[in-house]
Image: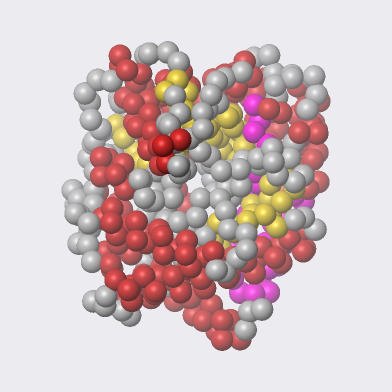
Amino acid sequence: MINMFEVKETNEMIEKENLDVRTITLGISLLDCIDGDVNKVCENVYNKITEKAKNLVKVGEDISHEYAIPIVNKRISVTPIALVGGACCKTSKDFVKIAKALDKAAKAVGVNFLGGYSALVSKGMTKADELLIRSIPEALSKTDLICSSVNLGSTKTGINMDAVRLMGEVIKETAEKTKDKDSLGCAKLVVFCNAPDDNPFMAGAFHGVTEADAIINVGVSGPGVVKYALEKVRGESFEVLCETIKKTAFKVTRVGQLVAREASKMLNVPFGIVDLSLAPTPAIGDSVADILCEIGLEHAGAPGTTAALALLNDQVKKGGVMASSYVGGLSGAFIPVSEDQGMINAVNAGALTLEKLEAMTCVCSVGLDMIAIPGDTKATTISGIIADEMAIGMVNQKTTAVRLIPVIGKKVGDSAEFGGLLGYAPIMPVNQISCDDFINRKGRIPAPIHSFKN
């Protein structure tokens, strides 16, 4: 039970410290929408989403009003569309038809984003997988609310380097097709290693095939709350620092648990998980980088950054798992550059580079996230960066991801504007030394050996 003292604390966190529920995400299985006719699939998909999600936005607003808890986004995730369209899609344009039906359904129910325009190809690609991947640039340029993800590797299967090479080309093409909006399409496209089935956060959300027909997942936020708590123990020992983060993460996750429970009851669908990630926003004071500075760094990227981020991530998880029986998703600290003003400041100060961000991804929740790079960056270079990040996830048995945005027509020193929750980003320099021969090899990198851990 949540007592009145917790309610008072929660109200203060909301009013003064930028606490919010980042998203409630309704996961919907579309497996029963499969048909041999693409037009029939589009009709089935539209009908199921608009039926299942018709009350999602209203329920989110009602909970927000009743408990005075800001719920920033209401979203939908669906079964990976490569599976749904496998029987009917003979060309990439057939998959684009489904993307448009998804976009139409998302707009009809009033959600912010719909995720699941996805393919899972960690070991190999079916014809449908490849068609969907090749359709991504067109799909993201012709829709407004669709997010896309591709899982390229896993600890158990290795890394599909053919798909890694293809995704470098797809990201470049997506950037080109949306260049009139600072290559915004790439901000809605992420590649994964070890993608979780139950991630409520875009752009990587999809409804896993192991899930129920419909579920509610909640993603909480709260970097500002953690920073505010750490200000009160400035200069104290690591023990005090860790205890403060754990206690704060517990309180934040309790809010997510409350919202998830109420949404589950009101929508009459099972509760899936609470993702307790510290997800920053462009708002001042809502920054993971600012937490790292409060821990003792001049800027994110300074020596000690990886250690400080590892500490933060671990304590967030330790505090969060005590607050909810069902913690999942990514859970930890996100480090998206464009969505975190402190990260942007660190880049502009010369403290934070792409290479340092890669090192930080070894210990954070996801990976290289919302990073704008020069528009003339080669596709093979993008694939090389992806391969590095996939290797970190594969070997360390963790989820890693890459969301790079080669902004067409812009170079280092410029900035890209994405708007809203996606923020803006300085264009970061990229190592231009060639990796072409490595990326152009065919096949896959095998899974790492584990038997010697016994």
Task: Name the side, left or right, on which 318 lies relative to 148.
Answer: left
Magenta stretch holds residue 429: no
> In the displayed structure, does residue 407 sit left or right of residue 147?
left
Quadrant of image for the C terminus: top left
Which sits in the foreground, 350 or 323? Answer: 323
The percent coordinates of residue 273 (x first, y second) are: 63, 56
Residue 72 magenta-drawn?
Answer: yes
Figure quadrant of the N terminus: bottom right
Q: Is residue 170 left or right of residue 307?
A: right
Residue 194 position in % (x across, y down) = 51, 38
Q: Is residue 27 left or right of residue 220?
A: right
Residue drawn at x 66%, y 30% is: 81
Which residue shows up at 26% across the image and 64% down it?
293
Q: Residue 296, relative to residue 204: is it above or below?
A: below
Rendering coords of residue 145 (x, y %): 59, 41
Q: In the image shown, does 4 or 113 lie closer to the viewer?
A: 4
Instruction: Please say if 67 is above or below 343.
Output: below
Q: Residue furthest front?
A: 454
Residue 288 can be seen, yes or no: yes
Q: For the magenta stretch, what is the residue range?
A: 53-82
The answer to which quarter of the image holds residue 357 is: top left
Q: Residue at x 38, y 13 (%)?
A: 441
Determine whether 271 is above or below 388 in the image: below
Q: Residue at x 52, y 60 (%)?
A: 276
Tell me the quarter of the picture where residue 437 sits: top left
